[in-house]
Image: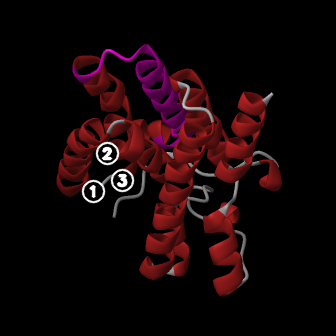
Amino acid sequence: MTRIIVIVVDYLLGSIPFGYLIVRRKIGADIRQTGSGGTGATNVSRRAGKTAGVLTLLLDAAKGCAAVLIARVVTGDDWVIAAAAIAALVGHIFPVWLGFRGGKGVATGVGIFAVLAPLALLCAGVIFIAMVVTTRYVSLGSIIAAVLIPVIVWFQSGSQSLLTAAILGAALIVFAHRGNIKRLVSGTESQI
């Protein structure tokens, strides 16, 4: 029962829509009605400024980190920790508070893997920065970095639970970027 409670709590934690709340507070708008329609840091930056975007990034990452730490402290079970991490990511992408329409999961994923696989995150982060600098597409950098995390985890770790979390996390993030992928293919994606 404790394990189920932890997973549910981490879903609810992940579903706190910081980007939505920050934009609503700052300019009185619904962030989902502009740009990519997501509640994440990139869309918040475009709508409410860089400070709001950075704050969203930090808070979304913090909830991913907190979700993993809660599961680790309460259960210590690697599979529950992996499930709780994915629950937090699902919560961010499909938040119950916003009709299951949230962000793309990148910042929350950063928080999750900062705890679960910091070296893999660092390697993927370097690739992300290189992609964004060379192409100016945050979405492309995010997709490639997300896909690289499970590959790097596979080489670095023998943990099946961690690899499972990495694969599911990457799949969720790529799925959340499906609109961006269509725009990238058609040449209509926004650049920074």
Is residue 171 rendered magenta in the image? yes
Marks 2 and 1 sit apart, C-alpha to C-alpha, by: 9 Å
Marks 3 and 2 sit apart, C-alpha to C-alpha, by: 5 Å
Three-letter amino acid code of the residue under disc 2: Gly
Three-letter amino acid code of the residue under disc 3: Val
Residue 90 placement (x, y as % from top left): 65, 38
Three-letter amino acid code of the residue under disc 1: Arg
Of 173 and 133, nearer the camera is 173
Tag 2 residue: 141
Residue 138: mark: 3
Tag 1 residue: 136
Residue appearing at x 60%, y 27% in the figure: 80
Would you call the spot at circle 1 few (<14 residues within 10 Å), some (14-19), or many (20 or more)?
some
Of the two numbered discs 2 and 1 on the same chain, state the one appearing first in sequence. Answer: 1
Residue appearing at x 22%, y 53% in the figure: 129
- The magenta stretch is 156-180
Residue 74 placement (x, y as % from top left): 63, 40
Q: Can residue 94 be seen in this view?
A: no
Main SS, magenta residues: helix
Q: Can residue 50 be seen in this view?
A: yes
Of 4 and 85, nearer the camera is 4
Of 115 and 48, nearer the camera is 115
Give SS at disc 2.
helix
User: Image height check: is 127 above or below 152?
Assistant: below
Of 2 and 21, nearer the camera is 2
Quadrant assignment for the N terminus: top right
Q: Are marks 3 and 2 in contact (CB under 8 Å)?
A: yes
Residue 8 placement (x, y as % from top left): 76, 38
Residue 182: mark: none
User: Image height check: is 108 above or below 144?
Assistant: below
Give SS at disc 3.
helix
* Count of residue discs: 3
